[in-house]
Amino acid sequence: MNKLLLIYAAIMMFGTFISAVSQVILKKAAGKEYENKIREYLNAPVIIAYSIFIMATFLSVFAYKVVPLSMGPILEATSYIYITIFGVTIFKEKLSFRRVIALSLIIVGIVVYSVFGV
């Protein structure tokens, strides 16, 4: 892989990471009680989370200028790993055997593509 591709792949992965952070912010905001429906959707955490989603989208579009279309979904699959880590550490969710197997398959797929793909 050339250096430019690595830089753009890192940009795409950063966008995927901040998208996962945004999902955590939205989940935290959803757990709160609000006095009305307007406040439920128009509050600082929700607005910040959707702003981060927009930024993540722009990062993906920017990264696709160099990242091949065949590599994009592989890089974006790392979001499952981030979400699982956040779920376990922040929300104290339990890891089931099926989830561990699924994450293992995702990681193996990423590694196989990284080694034998492109």
Image: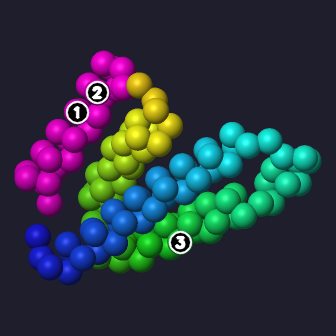
Residue 55 counted in the magenta span: no
Image position, residue 99 (x, y; %): 35, 26
Graded by Cα atoms within 10 Å as few (under 14), some (14 to 19) or many (20 or more), the crowding at tag 2 reads few
How far is the residue under mark 2 from the one under mark 3? 30 Å
At label 3, the amino acid type is Met
Q: Are marks 2 and 1 in contact (CB under 8 Å)?
A: yes
Horizontal side of 82 relative to 30 (left or right) equals left
* Depicted 85 relative to depicted 48: above or below: above
* Depicted 27 relative to depicted 5: above or below: above
Image position, residue 91 (x, y; %): 50, 37
At label 2, the amino acid type is Val
Helix, strand or loop at label 3? It is helix
Graded by Cα atoms within 10 Å as few (under 14), some (14 to 19) or many (20 or more), the crowding at tag 3 reads some
The answer to whether residue 80 is visible is: no
Q: Which residue is mark 1?
A: 104
Q: Which residue is mark 3?
A: 55
**For the magenta stretch, what is the residue range?**
95-118
Front one among 74 and 99: 99
What secondary structure predominates along the stretch shown in magenta?
Answer: helix
Horizontal side of 118 relative to 14 (left or right) equals left
**Residue at image coords 41%, 36%:** 88
Give the label on residue 52, or none.
none
Q: Which residue is mark 2?
A: 100
At label 1, the amino acid type is Ser
**Residue at image coords 42%, 77%:** 62
* Chosen colour scheme: rainbow
Mark 2, mark 3: which one is toward the viewer? Answer: 2
